[in-house]
Image (cartoon, coloured by chain):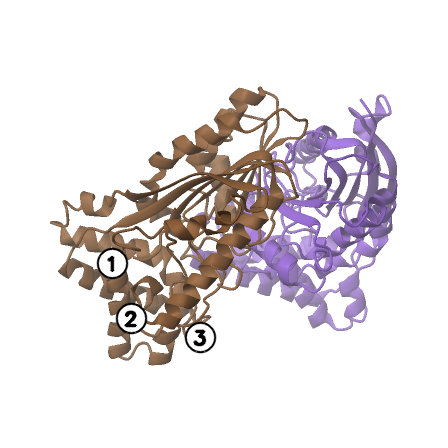
Chain colours: A purple, B brown
């Protein structure tokens, strides 16, 4: 598995509809496990942002997907801000993702899930904005606390096809590697620039994203290999043709520490943004652990394959000859999952899961 | 056809998913025709609301459905406010409907439809709130201009079954008529009360809603009759059982002029709201006209049946024994449409389409 989110946000990469309500949320437990290491940062940020002004407090959640992974962080943020700002202060929570995102699933969770941050606090106002986060999604100078998790590794577009891989991190093609690196640099700058515009002075943005580790690089070796292998299998048996496979790529990019730092390097600031902290760390491979370090090869394989199905197959399926052909699309999902499961079960392996966590703050202009 | 909207907003009446992306929008042309008579009111309201404050201007669209019928009014509102407030002033447009609404369709329209109010104005910020409009959906004192069209006739719940009808306006059951009238009164007060809380002083709310005419009452006689008749047909041929038909009702209510006025009667105010204008009028029956005053009976019947399928059948289908049974649900839609078409074609008739338009304003506390 090469990616770790539902689709994040992208300009030219269509987020593909998940397979039915909640499929992504049900299969996103891999990424749920690293929350505990970042929530303290979010809480810490909520403790220091200015709250002493008249307008409602605005918390923004960039790349919310179906909302399952937003409930806990937003609960933490709202609780911390509520404590500081007083019982009656309106707190707006703006959930952002691409236009095609399943916002109905999100609003359903907010209304009905026992873990919703709405419960017990009548002065919290959720909303959704279906718009790429590479542009502004809320008015200037409005966001006090921003949050984005497992989203900014998604690029705004595929800069080129990857001739020898489905994930550029494992490609040996220098042109593809360079094109993806350039796109990742542009996108990170565009993301930060949009946030610079919409954050209030003193506001904080907390980022959790896939990264490239100093040792081990992008990680997820076994999953990427089995996805790419499964595509070859489907091509070999005639289900896919070579031009379809060629077009298929996962437009995610694990930035290195240096790449995260780059926009801030020249002057210590990017616009009015300052990088407060950055830490690269390696997440626990939950599927590896739960499968008894791979001894239950079937469980190991099934879990990763299902996770890939929910998070990555939709993007791959957009490169099918006729992406609107629901029958062939369904068959693609099923065959990919089966082929991937076979391959994973044959050689279970622990995955490296490199992540970056950052706090960015906005200083007065 | 007894109703004239996609589902509006309701607390206990589940809005039923439409049949696929855009089905409602494609079949909502009946209500599109009365826009021209209300847009001048919206423009007029936009001309007088205060814009002289620091916060972004907020326009709220209550009951947006898939957004097709919101594009033009929001374009009118944004243009008028933009003219007064200056080029760089942020204008937020908040689209509200029930949590299960198809917000992805809305955001897709906003991004891609040539008629989107976003085009050419980079300082407009759309968002969506999936929450019943019988409660607050945005922070207190934030809305400068509110808009709701074809939505407030939807009740928050069915107060009781209607023993002899599918639409209470045609029932002879005194208890049902009284229960629906009570519910409509409560809901109108709840709707206004929530708006009172969230409007800014000086703000205006423009309302277009189904109404009950002084002469002719609720209207839509032929459509209601053919829906009720079609239900009887499906019961007679064994597709539906009697308890299902009994549970089926369309929880809309055409308020009389007196009922719209009621909350304001005691003191001239309701909370801090004042009724500026109210007018009951009769809309043009576009389907009647386009079918050559019924001479093309087949076109007449098809158009009304398709409109009912998109706007009313989902609500009826929620009363099926097993509403999650997609096959039987699909068959219900098809059989209802066929039966309704047969009945309508046999006796084309012009429909009375009574509507009310109102402007409500908020005075300083």
Q: Distance between the residues labelled 1 and 2?
A: 16 Å
Please, which chain is the residue tagged with disc 1 on? Answer: B
Where is mark 2, residue-wise? Answer: B231
Where is mark 1, residue-wise? Answer: B221
Where is mark 3, residue-wise? Answer: B322
Camera-side mark, 1 or 2: 1
Camera-side mark, 1 or 3: 1
Camera-side mark, 2 or 3: 2
- Quadrant for the C terminus of chain B in the image: top right
Q: Distance between the residues labelled 2 and 3?
A: 17 Å
Packing grade of label 1 (10 A; few <14, some 14-19, many >=20) is some
Any part of residue A357 in sight: yes
Q: In this view, does B315 lie above or below A142?
A: below
Q: Distance between the residues labelled 1 and 3?
A: 30 Å
Q: In this view, does B152 lie above or below A175?
A: below
- Seen from the viewer's position, the closer of residues A335 and B225 is B225
* Element class at badge 3: loop
Tell me if A238 is positioned left or right of A91 in this view. left
* Element class at badge 2: helix
| Tags 2 and 3 on a common chain | yes
Residue A175 image point, x, y percent: 66, 32
């Amino acid at each position: 598995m090469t990616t770790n989110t539902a689709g994040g946000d992208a300009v030219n990469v269509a987020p593909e509809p998940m397979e039915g309500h909640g499929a992504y949320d049900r299969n996103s437990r891999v990424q749920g496990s690293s929350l505990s290491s970042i929530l303290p940062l979010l809480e810490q940020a909520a403790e220091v942002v200015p709250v002493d002004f008249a307008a409602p407090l605005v918390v923004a959640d960039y790349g919310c997907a179906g909302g399952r992974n937003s409930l806990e962080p937003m609960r933490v943020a709202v609780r911390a801000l509520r404590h500081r700002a007083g019982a009656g202060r309106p707190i707006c929570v703006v959930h952002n993702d691409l236009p095609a995102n399943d916002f109905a699933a999100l609003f359903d969770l907010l209304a009905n899930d026992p873990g919703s941050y709405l419960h017990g606090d009548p002065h919290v106002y959720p909303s959704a904005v279906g718009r790429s986060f590479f542009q502004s999604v809320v008015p200037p100078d409005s966001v006090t606390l921003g949050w984005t998790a497992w989203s900014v590794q998604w690029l705004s577009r595929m800069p080129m096809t990857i001739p020898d891989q489905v994930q550029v991190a494992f490609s040996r093609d220098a042109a593809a590697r360079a094109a993806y690196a350039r796109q990742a640099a542009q996108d990170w700058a565009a993301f930060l620039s949009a946030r610079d515009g919409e954050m209030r002075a003193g506001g904080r943005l907390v980022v959790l994203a896939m990264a490239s580790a100093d040792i081990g690089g992008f990680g997820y070796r076994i999953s990427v290999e089995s996805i790419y292998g499964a595509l070859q299998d489907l091509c070999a048996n005639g289900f896919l043709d070579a031009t379809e496979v060629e077009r298929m790529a996962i437009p995610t990019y694990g930035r290195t520490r240096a790449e995260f730092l780059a926009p801030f390097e020249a002057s210590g600031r990017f616009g009015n943004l300052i990088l407060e902290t950055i830490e690269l760390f390696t997440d626990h491979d939950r599927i590896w652990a739960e499968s008894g370090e791979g001894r239950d090869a079937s469980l190991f394989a099934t879990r990763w394959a299902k996770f890939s199905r929910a998070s990555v197959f939709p993007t791959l399926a957009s490169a099918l000859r006729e992406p609107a052909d629901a029958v062939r699309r369904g068959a693609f999902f099923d065959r990919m999952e089966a082929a991937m499961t076979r391959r994973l079960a044959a050689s279970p392996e622990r995955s490296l899961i490199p992540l970056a966590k950052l706090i960015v703050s906005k200083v007065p202009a």
